[in-house]
Amino acid sequence: MDIIMENTPEMECVDQGEALHSDSAYGSSAVDTDTEDCLTPLEITFPYNEDLMHKTIMVGDSGVGKTSLLVQYDQGKFIPGSFSATVGIGFTNKVVTVDNVKVKLQIWDTAGQERFRSVTHAYYRDAQALLLLYDITSKSSFDNIRAWLTEIHEYAQKDVVIMLLGNKTDMAGERVIKREEGEKLAKEYGVPFMETSAKTGVNVELAFLAVAKELKHRAAQQPNEPKFQIHDYIASEKQKSGCCGGYM
Ligand SMILES: Nc1nc2c(ncn2[C@@H]2O[C@H](COP(=O)(O)OP(=O)(O)OP(=O)(O)O)[C@@H](O)[C@H]2O)c(=O)[nH]1
């Protein structure tokens, strides 16, 4: 396994035991030593595994535009016409390039109607990202965002990536939720926010790109590989550099 180790000037030559323990990504694999030593490379990131598939779910009230947003993102088109509510659940695979790395998203479109809610909950559990939508022309869809977030916190993983989207910005004349209200709510819950239009495509790619970036970033901090490999790598690097005799 390749590990990219970068020096940061302010972190040079600090006590290794302390430094490793201070990084929560290492947990119990942190190295203990009483030897004063000088392991310089302390900021460790992991190569992103392009085989990872990130389950991403679209949620929000019925009619906010989940299906339309996904169709716009996947096919670059908007199908106007009478609204037919999603009744099942289906997914679309997309590959997003982030800093020359391919991030795979498996995007699930869920039914917003209350009667399908228990089915949707089952999908939260292994989701890594959730796009939570409201419609800027519908006050009730905005008011329900708190209830959606409560459900998400109840059923989804703690570290799930959440993005709040206010959709249908092309319907400016019918807007009832100001952008600032969306921003304020997102800030309150500590989630990123964007306004989109599934009709014109405004910010649609950008929303998925932001999610992919965050997923890649998190994967680099929390590798799936067994931690002993990191431990062994650090030990071998220290031995090679002749640093820190007596270690291990
Ligand atoms: N003008 C405009 N209409 C939109 C936009 N997004 C969706 N719509 C329309 O809103 C209606 C509902 O859109 P859907 O994409 O089916 O909504 P949904 O959230 O998937 O609804 P459920 O499947 O019931 O959960 C449809 O008539 C869409 O054409 C948008 O950005 N602008």
Image: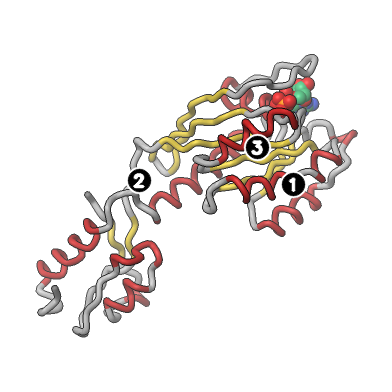
- SS for callout 1: helix
Q: Mark number for residue 147?
A: 1
Residue 30 visible from this viewpoint: yes
* Residue kind at label 2, given as amino acid type: Tyr
In the picture shown, does residue 132 fall above or below 14?
above
Q: Residue at x 10, y 67 (%)?
A: 240
Q: Nearer the viewer, residue 228 or 173?
A: 228
In the picture shown, does residue 61 fall above or below 81?
below
Task: Return the residue at label 3.
Answer: 203
Residue 65 visible from this viewpoint: no
- The picture places residue 69, in percent across and down from the top left corner, at 66, 28
Q: Is residue 41 left or right of residue 155?
A: left
Image quadrant in which you'd find residue 231: bottom left
How many marks do you count on the picture? Answer: 3
The crowd level at tag 1 (other Cα within 10 Å; few <14, some 14-19, many 20+) is few
Q: Which of the two discs, 3 and 1, labels the residue nearer the N terminus?
A: 1
* In this view, the mark in front (2 or 1): 1
Image quadrant in which you'd find residue 41: bottom left
Find the distance from the CA under tag 3 to the CA under tag 1: 25 Å
Task: Return the residue at label 2.
Answer: 48
Q: Which of the two discs, 2 and 3, labels the residue nearer the N terminus?
A: 2
- The picture places residue 169, in percent across and down from the top left corner, at 78, 35
Find the distance from the CA under tag 2 to the CA under tag 3: 26 Å
* Residue kind at label 3, given as amino acid type: Asn
Q: Regarding ligand 1, which quadrant of the image does it lie in?
A: top right
Q: Residue at x 79, y 47 (%)?
A: 179
